[in-house]
Image (cartoon, helix red, strand yellow):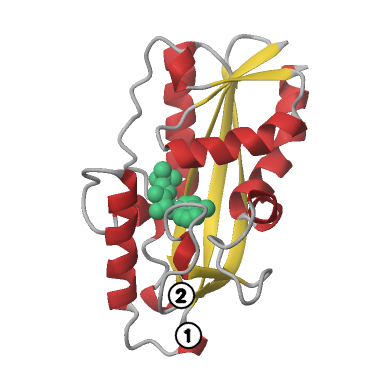
């Protein structure tokens, strides 16, 4: 059995990644943070999702020597010129306290910023860049990145209790009338930016590991 390291400190995001990957890669053991001796998540200071995903996957590979998958994701709102974008996780300031508290502060700030924006202009998308870094046949580091997107719009109040982050505010185009926090995990994975990106990268991971 091959082993891959999934490098993320966000527990809910990690759970999504593990549950999407597990059935697609039954022959691969997914190793999480708890299973490795030391992994210091790097500062995400690249200007793009792709750059940040690569940065995290490279750091994971350097720390563990294992082929590593990492994602960088966020919400891009058209009326805010694509923001929060790569700043999605820390839109309301440096994360402090619980993840739940941070999500709440981010959502409240986003609602404030969009207060005067009419319904037809509240469009946007979630994006997820997934990077895979592995040692090539010659031992030289190889990498690839893919992207998935989920289009939709930002509502005026939170709805739903599943998912994480901006899910309670976001109504995907694919699920009219329901936010992504009102979907079952299977429904979210089927349409989500993360589900799309991971399904695209799995065959390429399999090819790289074979
Ligand atoms: P990062 O990829 O760890 O930098 O953080 C991504 C941030 O984007 C999260 O903390 C959430 O605020 C937001 N985000 C990314 N994916 C999702 C999602 O599937 N649902 C809701 N929020 C998300």
Measured as percent of width and height from the top left, residue 23 is found at: 75, 32
Residue 2 located left or right of residue 140:
right
Q: Quadrant of the N terminus?
A: top right
Secondary element type, mark 2: helix
Answer above or below: position of 112 versus 144: below
Answer above or below: position of 179 versus 32: below
Answer above or below: position of 181 versus 196: below
Q: Residue 151 shows which numbered tag? A: none
Q: Quadrant of the C terminus?
A: top right
Res 92 quadrant in image: bottom left
Residue 122 located left or right of residue 188:
left
Label 1 crowding class (10 Å Cα cut-off): few <14, some 14-19, many 20+? few
Residue 196, visible in the rendered structure: yes
Residue at 64% over, 54% down = 184
Q: CA distance from mark 1 to mark 2?
A: 7 Å
Mark 1 and mark 2 lie on one chain; the one further toward the N terminus is 2
Secondary element type, mark 1: helix
- The answer to whether mark 2 is within 8 Å of ligand 1 is no
Residue 135, visible in the rendered structure: no
Q: Residue 121 shows which numbered tag? A: 1
Measured as percent of width and height from the top left, residue 116 is found at: 33, 88
Residue at 44% over, 18% down = 34
Measured as percent of width and height from the top left, residue 84 is found at: 36, 62
Label 2 crowding class (10 Å Cα cut-off): few <14, some 14-19, many 20+? some
**Front-most of residues 168 and 77:** 168
Answer above or below: position of 109 versus 98: below
- For the residues bearing labels 1 and 2, Cβ distance under 8 angstroms: yes
Residue at 43% over, 60% down = 166
- The answer to whether mark 1 is within 8 Å of ligand 1 is no
Q: Residue 78 shows which numbered tag? A: 2
Identity of the residue furthest to the front in this view: 161
């Amino acid at each position: 059995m091959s082993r891959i390291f999934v490098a993320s400190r966000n527990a809910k995001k990690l759970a999504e990644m593990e549950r999407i990957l597990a059935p697609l890669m039954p022959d691969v053991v997914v190793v999480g943070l708890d299973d490795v001796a030391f992994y210091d998540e790097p500062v995400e200071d690249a200007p793009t999702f792709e750059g940040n995903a690569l940065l995290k996957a490279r750091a994971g590979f350097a720390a563990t020597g294992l082929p590593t998958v990492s994602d960088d994701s966020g919400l891009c709102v058209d009326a805010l010129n694509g923001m929060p974008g790569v700043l999605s996780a820390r839109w309301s300031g440096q994360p402090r306290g619980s993840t739940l508290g941070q999500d709440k502060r981010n959502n409240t700030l986003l609602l404030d910023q969009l207060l005067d924006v009419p319904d037809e202009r509240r469009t946007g998308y979630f994006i997820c860049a997934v990077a895979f870094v592995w040692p090539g046949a010659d031992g030289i580091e190889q990498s690839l990145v893919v992207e998935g997107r989920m289009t939709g719009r930002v509502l005026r109040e939170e709805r739903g209790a599943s998912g994480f982050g901006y899910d309670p505010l976001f109504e995907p185009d694919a699920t009219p009338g329901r936010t992504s926090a009102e979907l079952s995990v299977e429904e979210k994975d089927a349409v989500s930016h993360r589900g799309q990106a991971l399904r695209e990268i799995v065959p390429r991971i399999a090819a790289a590991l074979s």
